Image: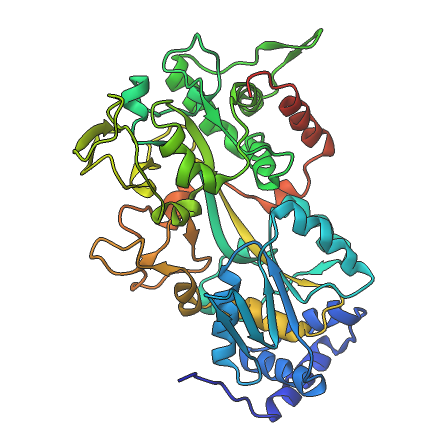
Amino acid sequence: MKKKILIGLSLFGAAAMSITACGNKESSKTGTARAVEEASKMTLAQLAEASKKEWEADPNGTMNVVGLTSVLRSVATSIAEKYEWLDYTYDKTTKTSTGNISVNNSYKDYQLLAVLPQAENTYFADYALAQDVRSFSTLMEDGITHNFVPSDTSAVGLPEVGKTPLYGVHFNKLFWTNTNFEHVNGFRLYNIWQVAGTSADHDHCDKVSFQSPTTEQINMSFLLTAYAEENQARIEAAYKSFYGKDWEPTTFKDGDITNTYRSAGDQWVREFIANISRFHTSDGTAMKQTQLRDDWNEGYVYYGAFAKMKDAVGNTFNVDLDGNGAVEAKAYSVECGGVTYNYASEENINAMTTVKWDWAIEGFNGFMYCMDSQIINNARYPYTACLFARTMLEEDVYTNAIYNAGTPDAEGAAANQYGYYYPGQTSADFKYAKGDWTKEQHMEKELNEDYEYLKNVKISSVNTILMLVNSNKKA
């Protein structure tokens, strides 16, 4: 039975009074911007009442939600269970929905960023869960999207940095391999300079698979973040550990011109891009298929979304693990990173069991970023869009969306899926998948998306990386 929250009409009047009285100054904002500004001053109960008033005024419309993840469908289900004027039911069999909320989560990041600007002058949708703050920071500045900040962020333990833009769900991308990596290469993945440098380096990783930053904008932001001043010490420390000497600026050839590396991060980015031997088109395919079916004996290092582990869970393949030319119903064991991985048979191998993601990599393991809540300009239901963003921050809503029996905790109970992380402060009851690191541990081991840094990156830095990708001779 659905749990509905009914709000008294008197609350909306109280909300309006508190807004107009605040500072005794009328806001100069209009339209969606004004609504979002007002919503940010409301209590949760007042925001819910404002949402209800929208639907009383326009009961036959649809609130449109757009984004990049199926998490949005679960949040839509939760908000409809909480508030009686909202309705959303999704049929997993037919992949269709009914109700006054519509969810389109089929966008790629660059596609969503490309279509949002039409909201400057016309209706496009009400709410967007977008990734890559570097790209959509200009949309915020231009008033194409608006940032809602709940008045009670402390209730969910949201950090100050998570307010602008408003956190939705944390994700990360990692450097990972299959469990046959060490057997093929004769060494472990332990330092970020292994995927840069040259083939003359000891323990050099010559095969690297990466999704092109020309289309995967979050990968562009990852590479740009390696240039950030705050990350130079860890990159320099990894350099010294790997090469046995301090990093110092050296020269390199840029066509016919001799240039000097500006920082350790600059050198790492340039050498890493030059070392990429494959630009894969899908992180999910790389994890659920390529690493096992096609690359078992290739020794590849992959960089991709850790959340794609959910795609690998249900994928099985028959693979000649021992390389004797035949797929057999016999056991196989392999050592990788100090762990023995045992496979009962070469038949029906689950792709998730051959992903080796937890390497201890000096420098950084990957990149932690967030999909953020944005209210779209010209929204028909701006208060409801703000309520949607606030509902997403509730731990029970998050766990309903993310917990999965396919990624259980150490006791076998359904737990947080790999690669998804709650944006607020987790309760003592929060369950991580078996073997996963906590969000805080991931953030410590990885480079972190920094809105203040990325929004000020110069276009010349982006163009430099695009040029490096285009000049790659290995892929």
The image's colouring method is: rainbow
Residue at horizontal 44%, vertical 68%? 397
Q: Quadrant of residue 144?
A: bottom right
Q: Which of the pair 332/245 is nearer the observer?
A: 332
* Residue 89 on image: x %, y %: 51, 74
User: 402 above or below 194?
Assistant: below
On the question of residue 62 being in view, the answer is yes
Residue drawn at x 46%, y 44% is: 172
Considering only vertical position in the picture, is 308 above or below 205?
Answer: below
Residue 185's place in the image compared with 110, above or below, is: above
Is residue 367 shown to the viewer in this render? no
Residue 221 at what x, y percent from top left?
59, 38
Could you tell me which quadrant the N terminus lies in?
Answer: bottom left
Q: How many marks?
A: 0
Q: Is residue 431 left or right of residue 228?
A: left
Image x and y of residue 133, in percent: 62, 47
